[in-house]
Image (cartoon, rainbow, N blue to C red):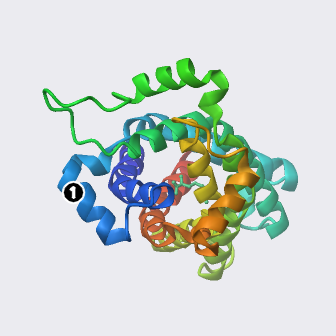
Amino acid sequence: HPLVTTGALGLVLGHPFDTVKVRLQTQTTYRGIVDCMVKIYRHESLLGFFKGMSFPIASIAVVNSVLFGVYSNTLLVLTATSHQERRAQPPSYTHIFLAGCTGGFLQAYCLAPFDLIKVRLQNQTEPRAQPGSPPPRYQGPVHCAASIFREEGPRGLFRGAWALTLRDTPTVGIYFITYEGLCRQYTPEGQNPSSATVLVAGGFAGIASWVAATPLDVIKSRMQMDGLRRRVYQGMLDCMVSSVRQEGLGVFFRGVTINSARAFPVNAVTFLSYEYLLRWWG
Ligand SMILES: CN(C)C(=N)NCCC[C@H](N)C(=O)O
């Protein structure tokens, strides 16, 4: 389907930005966005930016179905109005927020193992395997999942899941409030928002929610990398306290710029697909 293809394309184009974000959040060797990009390109070539991309692509359909499915069904239950009636009787922002939080909470559990494997692979700095050089620790997504299962146990696959849930529950509420608020602002009453409005509102919903999500995103990524060798953090709180002690409060905003640049296009196309699907099947 063309819209699913656009969604996947958005993900592919956004992935290099995501890799730079993850590295800035978890490694201290980079001085900033440009330094990180130059180093990745020099040591790992263009392919370095695309590490860890296969599981997000494979899981995007499931994760987004859970997110948008739970959101719209919760809204249906809360407001008792169908999607067709919704333009005439718009739901309250409280209901939108609660439905968004529910969607965020449940999608976090589906996302957790895929996100963990993505982050572990993105953080491998070895260039592509060359004959004679030692291979990277994880040789691909399936090998990575199997190794984590073997070395860290089944619960190891959910490392960082708690921080991920705390990150997504309120911020997905913010995501849908921003989207609906902007759509209402720029759409005449009773009408459907235009494609341009949907793209812009979706893009800003992505930025607003990711800015709010960044502090816990940093902690989540660090928790996911912990356990790779020696365990450094006793838990999420310990990770927060020692990160702030060592790097100052600025640590909570690591990667926010590059992530916002990624969030706009990715979420613009996500909401455009969502609106089209609702109008066809809603
Ligand atoms: C701030 N957060 C966690 C969110 N807004 N989540 C909703 C979906 C985000 C989209 N898949 C993305 O990758 O940008």
Residue 40: give x, y in percent of width and height: 27, 55
> What amino acid does circle 1 point to?
Tyr
Nearer to me, 118 or 187? 118
Q: Mark 1 sits on what residue? A: 41
Vertical comparison of 223 with 113: above or below: below
Looking at the rendering, the quadrant in which ligand 1 lies is bottom right
**CB at mark 1 closer than 8 A to ligand 1?**
no
Vertical comparison of 53 with 37: above or below: above
Displayed quadrant of residue 57: top left
Neighbourhood count class around disc 1 (C-alpha, 10 Å): few under 14, some 14–19, many 20 upward:
some
Residue 271: give x, y in percent of width and height: 53, 59
Question: In this rendering, would 87 be left or right of 255?
Answer: right
Q: Residue at x 14, y 27 (%)?
A: 132
Nearer to me, 250 or 195? 250
Question: In this rendering, would 4 be left or right of 166?
Answer: left
Kindly tell me whether residue 158 is visible in this rendering.
yes
Question: In this rendering, would 93 be left or right of 50?
Answer: right
Question: In this rendering, would 60 be left or right of 54?
Answer: right
Residue 61: give x, y in percent of width and height: 50, 38
Q: Secondary structure beneath disc 1?
A: helix
> What is the count of numbered marks?
1
Q: Can you name the residue that lies furthest to the left here?
A: 131
Kindly tell me whether residue 192 is visible in this rendering.
no
Residue 232: give x, y in percent of width and height: 62, 44
Vertical comparison of 273 with 179: above or below: above
Q: Residue at x 60, y 78 (%)?
A: 187
Q: Residue at x 67, y 63 (%)?
A: 176
Vertical comparison of 246 with 158: above or below: below
Q: Please identify the quadrant where the N terminus is shown.
A: top left
